[in-house]
Amino acid sequence: MSESSAAAYHLLSTVRRDVQLLDVSWNTDAHAGAPSPYLLLAYHRDRLTEAARIHKWSVPSNLTLSDLEELCNDALRAGSAGPQIETGDSHRIRILLSHTGALSVTASPTAPLPLPDPMAPSLWLPSTSDPDPPYSGFEALVIHVDRVPTPSSIFTRTKTTRREHYTAARDRFNIPPPPTATLLEVLLYNEDGIITETSIRNIAFVRRSPPRWVTPSASTGCLTGVIRRWLLEQGRVVEASDGELTRTDIVDGEYVLTFNGVEGCRFGRIRLTE
């Protein structure tokens, strides 16, 4: 890819900042043992570093955990037009990395976490006595299955500002662009009919016996998100085997688990009819 082409987009990571996370032990563990209001910030740092390697871009010297946290704090101060950070507020932090290695960070308000632990929904699995998920603070998403495949590429495997393929999928179902709040989502699959992700979230389906949350394999070309990584490390989800999650195996009305770096985990339900 030429330098002019690389200059047309940035690598991207979007992080939640929420004071509630200061009391979440697993988030502290993931932040070098220090309490942090940023959701898995070290994982975002790792993802940006890996994406830069994949795109053959420079990794800036200030892409350390402490420096990245300070850049996020600076963005919050700039947004509040004052030196004090409003620690009670919830924010969506957008981190951009250019092909030259330049980092830029902006902050915008977002809704507070509905649960003290944003990963709690991942602990539920359906059973005969408990077929419907508990209320997680979020209403369940309505997830349509896209009409056409989204081919796998470097722009599906890494998160960038080149998002035309995601926008096109959302447009086919009249879903407004993020960060507009909506309960509608669209499920994507690759050229081989293998499920990959949704337009702004990773996803897992209940499969196997005994039941497990099963998420598409990285080999599908899906985005390997930060919450996905944590859930896999904790054994709360497992990667699908070859052919385990295909478009033709989807069941109308089945519950799914979705996850991203701003919401954490939430439930959705497949809708095959439009």
Image: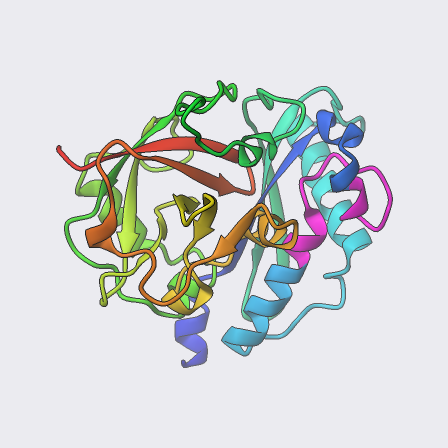
Q: Decide whether residue 43 is among the magenta residues.
A: yes
Q: Quadrant of the C terminus?
A: top left
**Magenta region, mostly helix, strand or loop?**
loop
Would you identify the image quadrant in which residue 261 lies? top right
Q: Quadrant of the N terminus?
A: bottom left
Instruction: Determine whether, in the image, residue 182 is placed left or right of residue 74.
Output: left
Pinpoint residue 142: horizontal percent, then vertical percent: 29, 30
Q: Nearer the viewer, residue 257 or 148?
A: 257
Q: In the orientation shown, which residue stands out farthest toward the right? A: 34
Residue 263 in view (yes/no): no
| Position above or below: 23 against 220 | above
Percent across and percent down for residue 163 are 35, 54
The picture places residue 249, in percent across and down from the top left corner, at: 24, 50
Start and end of the magenta stretch? Answer: 28-45
Residue 9 seen anywhere in this rendered image of the structure: yes
Relative to residue 56, is residue 66 drawn left or right?
right
